[in-house]
Amino acid sequence: MNKPLLKLITVLFLGAFTHNLYSQERTSINLKQGWEFRHADEKLAYQIDFDDSKWESVTIPHDWAIYGPFDQEIDKQIVQIKQNNEKVATEKTGRTGALPFTGVGWYRNTFTLPKHTPNKQVLLTFDGAMSNAKVYINGQLVGTRNYGYSYFYFDISSFINHEKENVLAVRLENKPFSSRWYPGAGLYRKVQLIIKEKISFQHWGHYVTTPFITDSLTRVNIKSKVKGKNLRIETQIMDAEDQLVGSNTETTLYGDAFIQNIAVQNPNLWSPETPYLYTAKLKLYEGDTLKDVETIRFGIRNIEYSREKGFVINGNTTKFKGVCLHHDLGPLGTAVNKSALKRQLTILKDMGCNAIRSAHNMPSLEQLELCDEMGFFFVAESFDEWKKPKVKNGYNLLFDEWAEKDVVNLVQATQNHPCIVMWSAGNEVPDQWGTAGVKRAKWLQDIFHREDPTRPVTVGMNQVKAVMKSGFGAVLDIPGLNYKVHLYEEAYEKFPQGLILGSETASTVSSRGVYKFPVKPATMKHYDDLQSSSYDLEYCSWSNLPEDDFVLQDDKPWVIGEFVWTGFDYLGEPTPYDTFWPSRSSYFGISDLAGLPKDRYYLYRSKWNKKDETLHILPHWNWEGREGETTPVFVYTNYNSAELFINGKSQGVRTKNTTTKQDRYRLRWMDVKYEPGKVKVIAFDDNGKSVAEKVLFTAGKPHHIELKADRTVLKANGEDISFVTATIVDKNGNPAPLADNRLNFKVTGKGTFRAVCNGDATSLEMFHHPTMKAFNGKLVVLVQSGFKAGEIELKVSGSGLKSSEYVLKVVNP
Ligand code: GAL
């Protein structure tokens, strides 16, 4: 064992940040540092004295596969994707991202518990481990967990040495043909040690609900699981300013639970617009001895789903303006990072999005915390497969043994998040066919209800005819339809619930800054450059354009909202190029893999963001060689009407109308002839008054680089990230929309270069190398803070371009 002293210091150091190690209170130690890793099947790596000195030192969260290289042979799947209506099997490259996620990976760490722990209980918790985890302490197998997205923990009290070094080893194994997207690999979420008294609150043991709410009074119900005699719970409820607003003491145990009802006067209600949070401080006493303290954050909000009013939050009918998200964070892979998640949500909030669906698995706890704080509804999903396979080594292998346990952990670990307003038991499961699937749907839904009677359950269904016939759709609390807009009416008639959720919508495809001619709607369209057009008229054989959903949302009160596939591009599933190479990430995103908005972002923003003005012109205006050719111009705006000018010549006024679904939501000038120069749009309000203006110029030669960070002040915590967008511009500062210069990055000072991404689904450049070609004039550089306060300098240079520097600040957390 190498570096034990360093590791020991690391653990104690981190522990010192949580709670006093010697009090009766629990201590949580986030095991981030001191890990050794190897991507190989080292047979004896679980043993205490195994020599891991030559292994790679890593920090957790960690995704071993994101460092590549991309290789089309990795997990090449020769499959017929039935849910996509494919008739024959074809060779799918890049379906799981073409990154080396398969095989075995080992992680090892050592820790020494503080003195005074022999009589304590020690838990080892994982927020997820990809996948087939086998966990060893001091050479002994503690337990296993197969599903890579599941939260799980083990009581390791009887496995550890007190006051001596303990060796933790985790073996993970990802099988080929186990996923339909990039699953990532490794300990990609938090790992923690929790040290608490033997008599203490059960892990995930509190369940907070607010069953009675009026303007003046709320009943906060808290169920807390404990075992023991002569126990007492003392609770204080604090508001967001940490002022006491309710309290209670309870001595009666109902079986293994305290049940308290606590009054909170004049409650501040949680909603996406007002994400107000309370905390409950819970103290457990045995006689007069304090045994445990936990703080649980919750919101006071009322949700209701009714055929008369649809989805109602705190008395207001609201539609889900939602997006589906896979769990990868583009250039970071699946290694969870709160700054990256926060940036995604900030971008989505500006778009007017109010809801997230975690497709097709358990979300990270960090994402739920942020949704509570920033105000997003959340549909937390469990599975992409039940017992019938989509991929050979998928969840179908685990369903019988693990489905109930995985659902229970999902609910228990996340139930106090006010953002969660619905559970999803599955996505397009092939069990939609046949009677066994109906029983499985009921069985899973009953488990959700047993664990949490306050939220309804949905399943994203794409076999709509089959589920109308079999009763599968009728069983669910909320029938969720994936695509199939032409069947909404029929499903509404046939299903008894009186509501339909667009659990997955659109799957329109586009590449940022790419425009194709002629401009016309197309399905599964292929071009030689393996890109899709940002005129936003291309979609899949099973899917549709955004307006097909908008019409249903606007015209049918019984449609309670939609979740667009997807908010951001993700690694893997490069439809419509899944049989082409190189192509390794999706085209579905409203924003690209780097988080840069595509044009579609402004289409959704023009409809969803009711507060801010949207006035966006497409395409770019650098079409050398297209002079005199028809080059349509689209404007996405919240205004109903606008006039377009090319070099001062009016192209006419367009007003939203119902001729086609597109004309209802976009302003389109289809006959514009290209000439270089200036494009100007003037928008009018409903009285015909000009209220906003936007211009766009033909850019000159790429000249210099403009840098703009999403955040300029970072925390000195070793993991905060600033996302710096580099835009190549001409000498007048106009973005050069076709520039593909290679850029190089140098980071000095109190931070490091973390990654870079240009959003090009066909790029095989690795994200962690400090160089990359710009894609359509842009890319995003990720700069990470160290542990010290000070300044970070980022220098971006590129051949033929004047380089740029940017200074970020790092402050003590
Ligand atoms: C759906 C599926 C998603 C994704 C999407 C692409 O059928 O649920 O996971 O594959 O299609 O359009």
Image (tube, grey):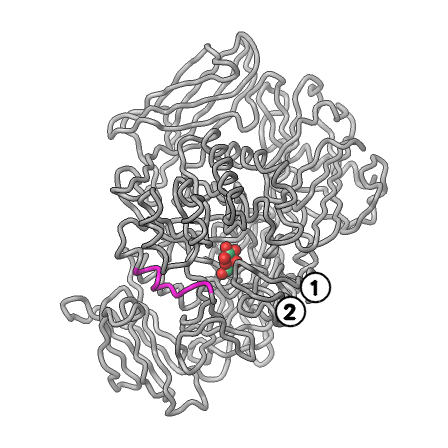
Decide if residue 675 is on the left or right side of residue 358. left
User: Tag 2: residue type?
Assistant: Leu
Q: Which residue shows up at 32% across the image and 34% down it?
A: 302
Residue that numbered label 1 is attached to: 69
Which segment did they paint magenta?
542-551
Q: Which residue shows up at 24% across the image and 75% down it?
A: 654
Q: Nearer the viewer, residue 686 or 666?
A: 666
**Mark 1 Cα within 10 Å, few/some/many (few <14, many 20+)?**
some
Q: Nearer the viewer, residue 468 or 106?
A: 468
Q: Nearer the viewer, residue 453 or 66?
A: 453
Q: Which residue shows up at 65% across the image and 61% down it?
A: 768
> How far across and how far down the image is residue 674, in percent?
37, 87
Q: Is residue 561 visible?
A: yes
The numbered dot on residue 764 is 2
How many badges with numbers are in the image? 2
Label 1 SS: loop
